[in-house]
Image (cartoon, rainbow, N blue to C red):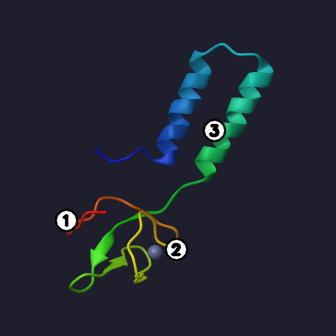
């Protein structure tokens, strides 16, 4: 199963907001937090094998020295690698 997308988190927060009875002040605070999550959509990509040991970013093709769990060039968050190399 894929990790939850920020939009899904925002949806759940919204539903929780309706389900829980809160003061107006608390609701406003939660709505503000929900907006932050919603507006912070993270680009997801994968490292794509680009040689014997190196991998390039699936989003921007950047070829970093080391493959982190995010791209240092475009900031894409990396999912599981398809080439089977351990993190
Ligand atoms: Zn990138």
Instruction: Determine which residue is flagged by label 1.
Output: 84
Where's residue 87, x and y in %? 31, 63
Instruction: Determine which residue is flagged by label 2.
Output: 74
Residue in the foreground of this view, choosing between 15 and 74? 74
State the CA–CA distance, disc 1 to disc 3: 35 Å
Relative height, residue 39 to residue 83 (above, below) = above
Label 2 sits on a secondary structure element that is loop
Relative height, residue 15 to residue 64 (above, below) = above
Residue in the foreground of this view, choosing between 20 and 51? 51
Taking the spot 42% from the left edge, 73% from the top edge, the residue there is 59
Mark 3 crowdedness (10 Å alpha carbons): few <14, some 14-19, many ≥20: many
State the CA–CA distance, disc 3 to disc 2: 24 Å
Sequence-earlier tag: 1 or 3? 3
Residue 55 figure quarter: bottom left
Mark 2 crowdedness (10 Å alpha carbons): few <14, some 14-19, many ≥20: few
Dot 2 beta carbon under 8 Å from ligand 1 = yes
Relative height, residue 30 to residue 8 (above, below) = above
Residue in the foreground of this view, choosing between 72 and 21? 72
């Amino acid at each position: 199963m894929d990790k939850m997308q920020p939009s899904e988190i925002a949806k759940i927060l919204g539903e929780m907001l309706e389900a829980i009875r809160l003061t107006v002040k608390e609701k406003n605070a939660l709505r503000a937090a929900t907006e932050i999550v919603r507006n912070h959509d993270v680009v997801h990509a994968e490292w794509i094998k680009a040689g014997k040991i190196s991998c390039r970013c699936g989003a921007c093709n950047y070829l970093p020295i080391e493959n982190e769990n995010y791209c240092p060039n475009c900031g894409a968050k990396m999912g599981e690698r398809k080439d089977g190399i351990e993190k």
